[in-house]
Amino acid sequence: MARKKRQPVLDAPLGRGTRRAPQPSRDRFGRFSEAFARAMGTSGFLIGMTVFVAVWLIWNTTADRQWQFDPAETNFTLLTLILSLQASYAAPLILLAQNRQDDRDRVQIEQDRQRAERNLADTEYLAREVVALRMALTDVSGQVVTRDVLRQELKSLLAQLDASRDARESAEPAAGSRES
């Protein structure tokens, strides 16, 4: 007997009735490796590891023979194994964290390059505009416009504005005294 095709339900989003296992974040292990590398690079970790090894060595050399779990006669085999295991996991995790940092640096460098290109384009545009304004002023005034000429023109405009403001201020008190 042929299977019945299920009709699609249009009032619910796809996959609503099915339960999917939650997908772990692809970046979770990378974040873990960065946290691990960051923790191993601290002075607290180094001091803690030094204290751990010192206590281990002191205990296994000075304690009674029945209490020693890694005696000095076996060259501290268990301690060597633990430290080797820690190093074998630490090295790849630190390399992974460095690779992630390199990726972030690469993106940052690309963004900085794009920002520098935009700044250069803006600067060139503004330089072209200043040249166009100078050329337009030269055409209008008939003389070559330099910084000194522009300063002189601005000073004369400022003097005219000051004179008109002074005239307006002196006219206002006179108008106010007539009204009283």
Image: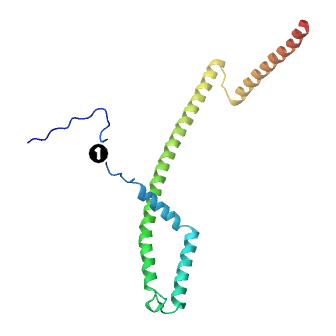
Q: Is residue 38 above or below residue 61?
A: above
Q: What residue is shown at x 45% (from left), y 89% (from top)?
A: 75
Structure colour scheme:
rainbow
Q: Is residue 13 visible?
A: yes
Residue 180 location (% of width, % of height): 91, 8
Label 1 SS: loop
Residue 127 location (% of width, % of height): 58, 33
Frontmost residue, 45 versus 63: 63
Residue 105 location (% of width, % of height): 48, 53
User: Dividing the picture into quarters, in which one does residue 85 lie?
Assistant: bottom left
Q: Is residue 97 visible?
A: no
Frontmost residue, 108 versus 11: 11
Q: What residue is shown at x 58% (from left), y 26% (from top)?
A: 132
Q: Please state, as top left, top right, bottom left or bottom right, where the N terminus lies in the image.
A: top left
Q: What residue is shown at x 58% (from left), y 69% (from top)?
A: 44
Decide if residue 50 is on the left or right side of residue 142: left
Residue under numbered circle 1:
18
Q: What residue is shown at x 56% (from left), y 78% (from top)?
A: 51
